[in-house]
Image (cartoon, rainbow, N blue to C red):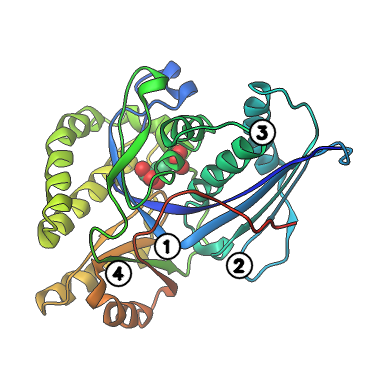
Amino acid sequence: MKTYKATAISPANIAFIKYWGWKNENDKALILPANDSISMNLSNCLTTTTVEFSPHFTSDSVKIAFFGQEKREATEKQREKVLHHVNRLKKTGDITLPVKIVSHNSFPSDAGIASSASAFSALTAATAHALGFAWDTKKLSIETRLSGSGSACRSIVDGFAYWQKDTNSENCYAYQLKDETWWDLADIVVVLDSHSKKISSLDGHQLATTSPYYQVRLQELPARIKKIKQAVEGKDFTRFGTLIEQEAISMHAICMTSQPPLFYWNHGTLEVILALQQWRKTGLMGYFTIDAGPNLHIICQKKDANILNQRLQALNNVSFTIVNTPCKGTRIIDNHLF
Ligand code: PMV
């Protein structure tokens, strides 16, 4: 009997302009962001996912493996989110068979990297392919966004992505700003020795509008987006670095002034920021950005990645680092995980 199987590989991405918050409940339901965002794919933070629909399966199953760890059943929460998305996609086709999903991440589970971006872009592409949908990158980006992990829609395209906001779901997707060969940048993910309680980005999106500064942020963003776009297009690294730090601080200022306040940083976060400021005075140029957690992404020019990586690893609170360069987006591959 015929089976339906496909495998996709997809990178996580780091946002230079952050997706943070929705304007209202309807936007929340459809993951329509309050602002545009810009990101770069990360070459060493990859998820590979195989999806198969088959009459041989008696029930749905979801298994995940992180680098260096055994494959295990997804947690109840992960399973629910994954199957909700797959079932929604399944409803748009003719196949009603049970599904088996196996996913492997190239990075450790405690890296604090938004693995949901690589996971949900890979899942969407593999599911669509297994179901026989011939979708272009725009459609794939829209459907990935609807998984609930909005930022995942930026991982679909190669290199540097621009996710445009829109009040209409069909116009809200990511497109390519520049491909992965455009700029010799590196992103050093700095994983801190942190046992702090994790606060999800969902909590942050939900609370964003409670900050008295949220409207100010939204007013500032068009000008900052324009400048960052120009800095990427003109490969103006110092300008770019200064702007991405402003942006990360702006997002975290919203978090810290939300009701209740959210503190994603810890003392290790500040140790790295202060060290970077010192190194820049000596001509070693690296700039930080931070997502919804204490860990940092240090963006530098590729030529400085080794020395910066060594210095970062020597800091007290740094547990380990992962060095990335810009890379291709989501792809279908032939090597299935089962
Ligand atoms: O896609 P989500 O819901 O995990 O939100 C992503 C939030 C940030 O990582 C902080 C910013 C971004 O644009 O990636």
Q: Mark 2 packing: few (<14 Cα in 10 Å), some, or many (20+)?
A: few
Q: Contact (CB < 8 A) between labels 4 and 3?
A: no
Indicate the quadrant of ligand 1 in the picture. top left
The residue at the point 26 percent across, 72 percent down is 302
The residue at the point 86 percent across, 41 percent down is 57
Q: Quadrant of residue 84?
A: top right
> Residue 327: x and y, percent?
38, 59
Q: Which residue is mark 4?
A: 272
Res 332 visible:
yes
Give the alpha-carbon distance from disc 1 to disc 3, as whole Å: 27 Å
Element assignment for label 2: loop
> Residue 162: x and y, percent?
29, 40
Q: In the displayed structure, would residue 329 be above or below residue 95?
A: below
Res 19 visible:
no
Q: Which residue is mark 3?
A: 131
Question: Which numbered marker is on residue 43?
Answer: 1
Q: Quadrant of residue 100?
A: top right
Query: Looking at mark 3, is its residue's CB closer than 8 Å to ligand 1?
Result: no
In front of the other: 330 or 238: 330
Give the alpha-carbon distance from disc 4 to disc 3, as whole Å: 46 Å
Q: Amino acid at mark 3?
A: Leu
> Residue 259: x and y, percent?
37, 33
Instruction: Compare marks 1 and 3 and give the one earlier in the sequence.
Output: 1
Q: Contact (CB < 8 A) between labels 2 and 3?
A: no
